[in-house]
Image: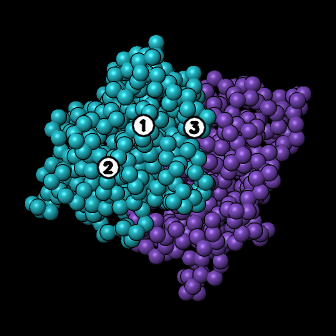
Chain colours: A cyan, B purple
Amino acid sequence: MRLATYDDGTSDGQLVVVSRDVRRAVDASAIAPNLLTAIRLWQSVEAQLRALSDRLDDDLVGDAVPFDPARCLAPLPRAPQWCDGSAFLNHGRLMDLAFDKPPIPDFDAVPVMYQGASDDFLGPQVDVPFVTEADGIDFEGEFGVIVDDVTMATPASACGGHIRLLVQINDWSLRAIGAREVRTGFGFLQAKPSTSFAPIAVTPDELGDAWREERVDMLLGIWRNGERIGAASGREMAFSFADLIAHAARTRRLTAGTIIGSGTVSNADRSVGSSCLAEIRASEMIDHGAARTPFLKFGDRVSMQALFADGRDGPFGRIDQTVVGAGERHESASPRSSGRSGM
Amino acid sequence: MRLATYDDGTSDGQLVVVSRDVRRAVDASAIAPNLLTAIRLWQSVEAQLRALSDRLDDDLVGDAVPFDPARCLAPLPRAPQWCDGSAFLNHGRLMDLAFDKPPIPDFDAVPVMYQGASDDFLGPQVDVPFVTEADGIDFEGEFGVIVDDVTMATPASACGGHIRLLVQINDWSLRAIGAREVRTGFGFLQAKPSTSFAPIAVTPDELGDAWREERVDMLLGIWRNGERIGAASGREMAFSFADLIAHAARTRRLTAGTIIGSGTVSNADRSVGSSCLAEIRASEMIDHGAARTPFLKFGDRVSMQALFADGRDGPFGRIDQTVVGAGERHESASPRSSGRSGM
């Protein structure tokens, strides 16, 4: 089942079900007004949503409309928590080099995770505002999961069953600030502005065999200004999403709608490219003694599309965004959270 | 004006106005259903709330009830963001010693701040569950502010005007985990379970002269099992709340209801005591070569009450909580968020 959120002027948006061929959508707000409510009430609404999805795929829904990703907010425009792991150890190793810092102790035994802001997620096609190019604007392609209620100290073996939906993420990062913040020990705050999401959240069964051992075994295609720079596999996570959920829930309960991220998808095989510029720059430091690839400039375009092993497009839809100066935002151009209101 | 949140079974609770003598309260949900909505609509509801507050203080409200802190949730049981600074440099210096780590670069020039979870705040009298005493259970007495909408990159000079309410906080901390997490550079996550709040959020004018230069010039009384262990002053912040808001908003907008914390209230004058056990232990390391004071055990009680310079109780009310094992929670004993539901 594929779910998306249309901008209807409210903070949480309007729930729609998307057809398997990604061509049509149908309003599902009669079942649950928005995705956050659907996650909270999952046990009681899942069957109705799946029935609607089946009717849509069988072309039996009278009021279906063409699916328009430009109308989409993030699947959850705001969430109770956003906890982002760093489960691809290759990324961690390269970032230690990029930030010129020693390795994290036990980074291969205990998941590393930071708490991000979760009140202002961005949809897949809105312009993304930044204060200055000097902050070192970068992207991070990731996969993530949305969970229902998880009790404090739930063991990893019981966490997989709490995964309700899978999502595809661009965790925008400011590297000049990150290099300073990682040294404080207090973690990333200014270095992590609003995070962007592909339009469609999917139930794990939509991935078929590509969802296994609580990992997304797909390639994450990454393009900068139309040039593909990466297609790394999500299977190389050192910790599964179940492990990451258990880590987040070790000393707190997670409320339904919490999003857990994989961290930047990154493979030891360098030939697959990278899901962020900082890794490319770190590799250039290794090979040439200095970074050559610049961070993003205003006007640069970043696109992300998950791909099955056979090259077919994945079910999350496409992130396709332009980096702009904070003063240059075009409020009316496309749906964005800043234009929304209400509860 | 003093505002509190009664547990009515909903996620955001019910807004009440509290009298200046803290003896009576009146339902304010006809003006705004809950405090989060009131903050969002502050410009249009403030005058009505103040008028109700004045009538309550003049004993002109027919349906006032005795104010009962045991019915209170946190003023905001959930908030869009919770960003906690570390503005008392004395605390930072002692924590570097406690965690056996080098000083944070530029810690006296750039505020240090971490992002905390904001979906599950605890009221002033509920038992607080922890998984194990071995995590090094500690408290941190703090002040904080609740802001309305703040645009990305707002300068500090314009941030003071966004402060709508002041709050008093216990930022529960797990020191055994914190010592590890601070070394990852990714910041505190497991080390920071749900945060507790005193029952009453107040407009800055309630503090009179004790609110100046965007700092709370009051003493924060701290008791462990009835023994007072600290009464440090909030005026010694190296960065004002306006500075901290500007830091948080440097690369993101803050949505109305965001809470910004001061960090542990701590003074260079050691005779005033401490607002957390880790500082006491660090001082013992300096004086005796080893820490003597243990962290908290299940059954220990922690109380916090802000005091004016003349010894009068401050307006926030009292935090008075018992530490319990996660399996020992008494769900029916007092209002807690885990018993709440709905949007």
Q: Which mark identifies residue A202?
A: 1
Task: Determine whether label 2 and label 3 are within 8 Å by CB.
Answer: no
In the picture provided, is A301 more to the left or to the right than A317?
left
Relative to B97, residue B267 above or below = above
Question: Up-down: is A61 above or below A122?
Answer: above
Residue projecting furthest to the front: A58
Do marks 1 and 3 share a chain? yes
Quadrant housing the C terminus of chain A: top right
Label 2 sits on a secondary structure element that is loop
Amino acid type indicated by mark 1: Val
Chain bearing mark 3 = A
The relative height of residue A317 versus residue B286 in the rendered view (above or below) is above
Judging from the image, mark 1 belongs to the subunit labelled A
Q: Is residue A27 above or below residue B300?
A: above
The location of residue A2, given as percent across then percent down, is 42, 32
Question: What is the secondary structure assignment of the residue under circle 3?
Answer: helix
In the image, residue A103 lies at what x, y percent?
A: 32, 69
Q: Is residue A64 visible?
A: yes
Q: Which residue is mark 2?
A: A217
Q: Which of these two is toward me, B65 or A123?
A: A123
Nearest the eye: A112 or A214:
A214
The residue shown at (70%, 42%) is B340
First of labels 2, 3 by sequence position: 3
Tag 3: amino acid: Trp
> In what quadrant of the picture does the N terminus of chain A appear?
top left
Residue at the spot x=73%, y=34% of the render?
A: B15
Q: Which residue type does callout 2 highlight?
A: Asp
- Determine the CA span between mark 2 and mark 3: 25 Å
Q: Position of residue B219 (x, y in %)?
A: 69, 59
Labelled disc at residue A42? 3
Q: What is the CA distance from the residue labelled 1 to the residue labelled 3? A: 14 Å
